[in-house]
Amino acid sequence: MMYSIAKAEQSLQAKRGDLNLRWYPRYHLAARAGWMNDPNGLVWFDGWYHAFYQHHPYSTQWGPMHWGHARSKDLVRWEHLPVALAPEGPEDKDGCFSGSAVVDGDTLALIYTGHKFHGDPDDEANLYQVQCLATSRDGVHFTRQGTIVDTPPGLHHFRDPKVWREGERWYMVVGARDGETGQVRVYRSDDLREWQDMGVLAVAEKDMGYMWECPDFFTLNGKRVLMFSPQGLAAEGFKNRNLFQSGYLLGEWQPGQPFVREGEFVEMDSGHDFYAPQSFLTPDGRRIVIGWLDMWESPFPEQQDGWAGMLSLPRELMLSADNRLQMRPAREVESLRGAWFPWPVSTLNNQQIVQVESCDAMEVILQWDCANSSAEQYGIRLGDGFRLYVDAQMQRLVLERYYPQYGLCGTRSVALNLNDTLSLRLFVDSSSVEAFVNEGEACLSSRIYPDEGARELTMFAWTGTASLIEAGAWQLE
Ligand code: FRU
């Protein structure tokens, strides 16, 4: 099949009306129909935030990648725009893979990976990935400019360019696989077209993965942050439980110098579903990150509804005093708040209380006084499938989902200090939850699939008491 933007739009128009919206997000970005994965090209241009994304407009399964496109004035109310890139070839004939966007004077430039097989696509030896450029003046229609960086000799997996401006130049990091070792390569340019190879920025040390996807490299509080999504890490206790991870390394770097890393790789989100995050700067200088709120090879029950995949809330990145990356919902998210419902409860004593009959778009605020709670388990439950609770014996905050009908059962958790208070901001949407812990100390994000009519929100405390300092919920518009 020959792909084009016009055909993609036709397919989307035809499919859009057939969606079952029971799990379609009320306030997160998802494709109009079909498949979505990584956020791409996040950028502020000409008065709008733009979000592009990996998109298959013809099917709810991953396939020949297009770039979907939406824009927003406030990072939370998105307007769909026509598909921006289709794999029209030859340099991207098998897919327009992930990449980034920069503003170059009055031009919006997309830098993305052209994915192509020279011969039989079942043979990895035929795979080539190159970096490509497309430009636009109006931010809606893009002109393809072709290949700007060819596959380095000996490599096949070489993708996900992230471009930024520093001093008088453009820089680009690209994720790659050299044999069984992941790496990030770095390039520099004066004009976004001619690129000079500056070598390898970072490589996977022992057990750090066979491929590093979606690298991003930026400065936060004077530290360099290398954020990326490694493939091939082994699960270890409570860590690295998902098929693939996303996280960061901190360090020091100056153009032309090696990247000197400090410390270990740290995962950014401890839930089931957060991958391929990308960052960008707001006009007022905040570093915001958005991720794909899903995980490769996980079941996607919404495929039966005509769509698949969604993006996370925009999250502001901060570096804590002890040099840990923290994420909090971007302040724009508060503009979704409608009515506030305080919950008149201060102590739960071996009991459960229904707080909301049907919860589908809410921000729940909870502050537990852990030091003055004796219960073994206390927290909140949505229907019968989702719980977020303190397990006092384990001294952990646990996110549990139980959807055996879809093959999605299991827990994720983070360590807690029970001598302290625990503050939670929990964002519930039709098929997702994002829990921000203690103002960004941790974050747990997972997809959820409640049955219709089974969205009661219940607080509970078992075997003892649990005290609350604050409890309530915002209805989100
Ligand atoms: C990450 C990723 C990228 C690639 C894209 C393909 O989720 O595998 O490395 O560019 O998805 O859709």
Image: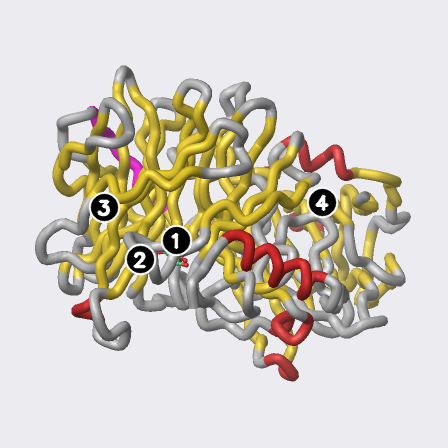
For numbered disc 1, what is the local secondary structure?
strand
For numbered disc 2, what is the local secondary structure?
strand
Query: Is label 3's Cβ within 8 Å of ligand 1?
Result: no
Query: Is label 2's Cβ within 8 Å of ligand 1?
Result: yes
Could you tell me how far apart the alpha carbons at marks 4 and 1 are, in whole angstroms? Answer: 45 Å
Residue matched to label 3: 184
Residue matched to label 2: 115
> Going by the image, does 60 lie left or right of 86?
right
The local crowd at label 4, few if under 14, some if 14 to 19, many if 20 or more residues have their Cα within 10 Å, is some
Q: Which residues are magenta?
A: 248-254
Any part of residue 292 in sight: yes
Depth check, mark 3 against mark 1: the one in front is: 1
The kind of residue tagged 3 is Val
Residue 452 in the image: state x and y as whole percent: 81, 72
Quadrant placement of the C terminus: top right
Could you tell me how far apart the alpha carbons at marks 1 and 2 are, in whole angstroms? Answer: 6 Å
Nearer-N-terminus badge (4/2): 2
Is 460 situated above or below 422?
below
Is 144 situated above or below 233?
above
Quadrant observed for ligand 1 in the rendered image:
bottom left
Residue matched to label 1: 96
Circles 1 and 2, Cβ within 8 Å, touching? The answer is: yes
Nearer-N-terminus badge (3/1): 1
